[in-house]
Image (cartoon, rainbow, N blue to C red):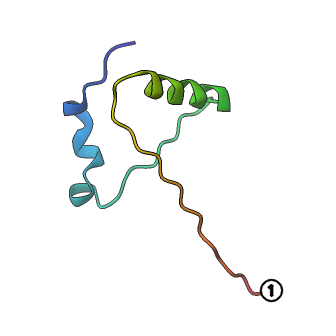
Amino acid sequence: MSELLWDDVKGLFDPEREGCLPDVWVAGTVVEDWQAVLDLILASDWRSKTVSYVARRTYRL
């Protein structure tokens, strides 16, 4: 795998330039693939932050 350099992609994650963070869609992946990515992040010295938002919505029937 080639190395992905932050300087090459950081503009894609700039909320002032892009307006919001990009959605990530990778066809053909399974839960285990994403777990491997998370494990890689945790094992590295990369800075990371996990935030969980739970939206509460009320629907009228």
Quadrant assignment for the C terminus: bottom right
Left-right relation of 27 to 41: right
Viewer-closest of 13 and 42? 42
Residue 24 left/right relative to 45: right
Horizontal and vertical percent for residue 41? 44, 28
Q: Residue at x 51, y 27 (%)?
A: 37
**Crowding near pointer 1: few (<14 within 10 Å), some, many (20+)?**
few
Task: Give the camera-side residue of 47 and 7.
Answer: 47
Q: Where is mark 1, residue-wise?
A: 61
Question: 50 left or right of 17?
Answer: right
Residue positioned most to the right: 61
Q: Is residue 59 above or below residue 24?
A: below
User: In the image, what residue occupies the spot 41% across and 44% down?
Assistant: 49
Q: Based on the displayed image, in which of its 4 quarters is residue 36 positioned?
A: top right
Of 2 and 40, the residue lying toward us: 40
Q: For the residue marked with disc 1, what is the amino acid? A: Leu
Considering the numbered disc 1 on the image, is that residue within a helix, a strand or a loop? loop
Based on the displayed image, in which of its 4 quarters is residue 54 positioned? Answer: bottom right
Q: Point out residue 11 in the picture as x, y percentages from the top left corner.
A: 22, 44
- Is 48 drawn above or below residue 3 in the view shown? below
Q: Position of residue 33 (x, y in %)?
A: 60, 26
Numbered disc total: 1
Is the residue 12 above or below the residue 8 in the image? below
Residue 13 is situated, as x and y percent measured from the top left of the image, at 29, 47
State which quarter of the image contains the N terminus: top left
What residue occupies the far top of the structure in this picture?
Answer: 1
Residue at position x 19%, y 32% in the image: 7
